[in-house]
Image (spheres, grey):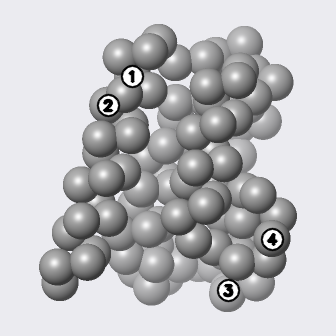
């Protein structure tokens, strides 16, 4: 998931978290078909949108992802914690 700015950076985390929190609402609010959503959110290229894609995004951020905008470690930790909270919320609903 990315925000279409051409860079992998911390700004890509929020769209991914929103997408995982409620896929249907995210697709509707962004006028995305299933195919367009998969193309946008399938970070690791395995044809499936799942937790592995968030991990792939976080790995890109950690490695620099080809962007000059790499989050500070504290931002990275907060992103991982936020992702964990979203996933816990989905499991208990």
Estimate the spatial distance between the alpha carbons at disc 2 and disc 4, rounded to whole Å.
26 Å
x then y, percent, for residue 63: 70, 23
Pick whichever of labels 3 and 2 is earlier in the sequence. Answer: 3
Give the residue number, with chain letter if any, for mark 4.
Answer: 46
Q: Name the quadrant containing residue 7.
A: top right
> Are the residues tagged 1 and 2 within 8 Å (C-beta)?
yes
- Foreground label between 1 and 4: 4
Count neighbours of disc 4 (C-alpha within 10 A) and say few if under 14, some if 14 to 19, many if 20 or more. few
- Foreground label between 1 and 3: 1
Pick whichever of labels 3 and 4 is earlier in the sequence. Answer: 3
- Foreground label between 3 and 2: 2
> Are the residues tagged 3 and 2 within 8 Å (C-beta)?
no
Give the residue number, with chain letter if any, for mark 3.
Answer: 33
> Are the residues tagged 1 and 3 within 8 Å (C-beta)?
no
Task: Name the disc covering residue 54, or none.
Answer: none
* Viewer can see residue 36: no
Q: Residue drawn 66% across and 48% down?
A: 56
Q: Residue drawn 75% across and 28% down?
A: 65
Count neighbours of disc 2 (C-alpha within 10 A) and say few if under 14, some if 14 to 19, many if 20 or more. few
């Amino acid at each position: 998931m990315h925000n279409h700015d051409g860079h992998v950076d911390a700004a890509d985390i929020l769209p991914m978290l929103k997408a995982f929190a409620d896929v249907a609402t995210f697709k509707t609010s962004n006028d995305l078909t299933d195919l367009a959503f998969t193309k946008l959110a399938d970070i690791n290229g395995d044809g499936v949108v799942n937790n592995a894609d968030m991990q792939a995004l976080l790995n890109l951020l950690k490695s620099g992802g080809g962007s000059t905008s790499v989050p500070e470690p504290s931002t990275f930790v907060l992103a991982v914690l936020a992702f964990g909270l979203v996933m816990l919320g989905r499991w208990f609903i």
